[in-house]
Image: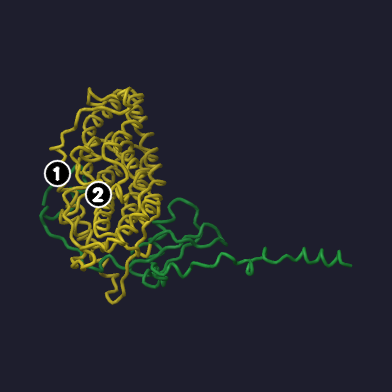
Amino acid sequence: MYGGGYIFDEPNGKQLREEQLHDDPEKLVAFEERITRGEKIEPGDWMPAEYRRQLIRLIEQHAHSEIIGALPEGTWITRAPGFKRKLALIAKVQDEIGHGQLLYNAAETLGKSREAMINDLLSGKSKYSNVFNYPAKTWADVTVIGFLIDAAAIVNQVANAKGSYGPYCRALERICYEESFHLKQGHDAFIELATGTPEQKAMLQDALNRWWQPIMHFFGPPDKTSQHSEKLMQWKVKMASNDEMRNQFLDSYVPKIWELGMTLPDPALHKNPDTGRWEYTDPDWNEFFRVINGGGPCNAERLQVRKWAEEEGRWVRKALMNPTERRSLPVA
Amino acid sequence: MSNDSLDPRVNRLKLSDANAVIKVEEGENWNVYEVFHQEKRGAHHEHVGCVHAPDPQLALVFAKEQFARRKKCVNLWVVRSADILAFDVEDEDMFANNLEKNYRDASGFKVMEKINKFKQSK
């Protein structure tokens, strides 16, 4: 779900060594046996080149999503309705930035520097979750993001926390613990609007209608069109298919939307009582690819703001930098 | 450059061209420090993760923001990741040991049995 059109390069422009191009078949067998036994892979351990590249891609893009995801919400801190909502929103935005830091650290243990990841984000080479390319027009949008986007992210993160790479799992455990507050405060704000005045209900319904397609896009394209995820599932990099996670999300959250008298803009959406699975109108996947490739309403602004932060903060970072210091990667 | 963001603060920024190339230099994000968290006085400091910082003092400040936002914390340690010395993972077998180790365990010494035997023999 944090995927996209990212072409893999060796981190920091280094050339691959011979043994990294062709995995030692004996080591590969031992590696796969470890994963089957449920062991965690740690930074110093032998791992197939493809496992490492896919993990860097996944964790890096997850990190970018946390940082960029804080932008549409941060926008609303100054305009949050009331002191309690403002405090909660500040806390949530700070958490998201913290999650980005934890995830960048986990990705760094695989050998790609923080600077290289930021450069790939700024150049548009590396992607982030597509939902953040849409604007948060009203307070109800912030409410829908806080409740449903965070709920969807939790479904994904709880699954990934059972994956095979130790540093990513440990980061996700801390993240999931903090996200439970994000979800609860989002649900609370959602209920307040849904049970409020006719204007509040109308505002929430409008936000739901606009966000439903991006939410359906959130877990990525349907399994029937998704490529080469079998190996990633075996290596416990990907823990559940896109459709499985989407179904799990619908199962948990559609009833919570309907019970408050709100509707969703898909007349075909229902749970099939025979299969126990949700059926729905396929969202427009061409729109998904158009937005992920830069055509969304906010892609340009998100990266411009991110570039502004890097440029304006540079003098502070440089003033504090000690260029002769021996640098290293995180140890775990 | 003007832009039409929904965020009034964004509209006040002087944002560069969307196609401008901004590149962060290697080293600009400083060094890595490992963070150890202490939950209460007298408890062990436990490794919880790491932060990027230019020096140990700021590493402590960032560690507080990152790892002491919620759960109880009374102290933090930070140490440069480069200063951590660890065994090679490949050498894990050096920790394999003989399971028969009651010679270094309290249960390996049957004092009472010997005392009772001595008392009965009197």
Name the foreground residue: B18 vs A139: B18
Q: Chain A, which colour?
A: yellow
Task: Name the residue tied to disc 1.
Answer: B4
x 63%, y 69%: residue: B104
Name the foreground residue: A79 vs A121: A121
Across and down, in percent, residue A117 comes to 23, 59
Q: What's the chain of the residue with tag 2?
A: A
Name the foreground residue: A226 vs A78: A226
Across and down, in percent, residue A210 comes to 21, 32
Q: Can you say whether A120 is above or below B30 in the image?
A: above
Mark in the foreground, 1 or 2: 2
A153 lies left or right of B99: left
For the colour green, the matching chain is B
Q: Which residue appears farthest toward the bottom when viewing the image?
A: A324
x 21%, y 54%: residue: A306
Q: Quadrant of the N terminus of chain A?
A: top left
Task: Name the residue tied to disc 2.
Answer: A68
A242 lies left or right of A90: left
Name the foreground residue: A116 vs A51: A51
Q: Amino acid at mark 2?
A: Ile
On the question of residue A44 being in view, the answer is yes
Q: Amino acid at mark 1?
A: Asp
Give how far apart the Cα atoms at labels 1 and 2 are. 18 Å
**Residue A132: numbered disc:** none
Across and down, in percent, residue A21 comes to 20, 63
